[in-house]
Image: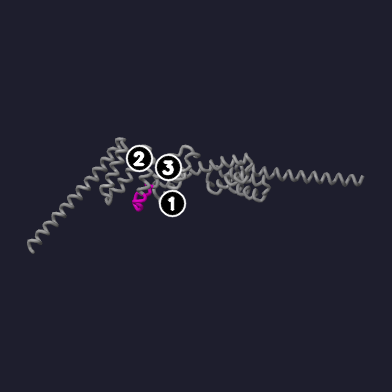
Amino acid sequence: LLLVFFFLNACSKDKIKDSQLNQKNLDSQVLEAYQEGLKSLRGGDVLFAAKKFNEAEILFPQSIWAPKSALMAAYSYYSQDYYSDAIAELDRFIKIYPYNKNLDYAYYLLGTSYYEQIVNEEKDLQSMMQAKKNFTTVVDKFPKTEYSLDAEFKLDLIDQILASKEMYIGRYYFEKKKWIPSINRFLNVVNYYNETIYTEEALYRLVEMYYILGLESESKKFAQLLGYNYNSSEWYKKSYKLFVASYKEKENVIKKDKSKLLQKVKSLLD
């Protein structure tokens, strides 16, 4: 029994030593792969860098190097405009490491990867909406981070583009005398993009169209809203002139009717 005890004890010590050696060996392999990735990234070989960062993550997925390596792989792709690969890596990072301390950066880089693909607002609407979604997440969930301020700035630019698109379509429908679709587009600007430079014109267009449709109370409602927020703007002056012209026209009709009535009375007296 004593011999068996000593034999088992010796074996367990050997196993501990082996596991410690394997652990140290694994750590050194992870660090080596990570450093190779950094070296390749600095040298401009981003595809090989991403491969080495992925290798470092796979070697020891429980280590602190794993999430860092995954994020560096995403950045490697992003740095040379491999946006689809960067987006795939970042989506995976967010799913696998939802509580990581660098999650704010992951969302910011994901939004930026979509944002930098926007060339034409008509063709790249999907990229624009995805960029807006991820930047909104940064602003809402991580408001005090260094990425939040730039995310807000980019969100403002995206809203300007989207509002511009709504205005363009709204004007097109207006020229075609398709009042309802036109009204809906201008209402979108007022309701969803009211901090853009297009809000004043959108309000005026609503004043104008409701007036054309004979819905004077609705027209006046938007005119008051325009006056309350932009009482010194050219668009408010135009809406004011619209109602003044209408009032003068009615006044002239009343005067003409009165003069006709007076003429009839005079003819009766003559």
In this view, the mark in front (1 or 3): 3
Considering the image in quadrants, where does the N terminus appear? bottom left
* Sequence-wise first label, 1 or 2: 2
Q: From the viewer's perspective, tell me whether residue 242 is left or right of residue 35.
A: right
Q: Position of residue 261 (x, y in %)?
A: 84, 46
Residue beneath disc 3: 114
* Sequence-wise first label, 2 or 3: 2
CA–CA distance between discs 1 and 2? 27 Å
Graded by Cα atoms within 10 Å as few (under 14), some (14 to 19) or many (20 or more), the crowding at tag 1 reads few
CA–CA distance between discs 2 and 3? 13 Å
Residue beneath disc 1: 140
Does 1 lie within the magenta span?
Answer: no
Residue beneath disc 2: 77
Callout 1 amino acid: Asp
Q: Position of residue 39 (x, y in %)?
A: 27, 38
Q: Which residues are magenta?
A: 94-106
Callout 2 amino acid: Tyr
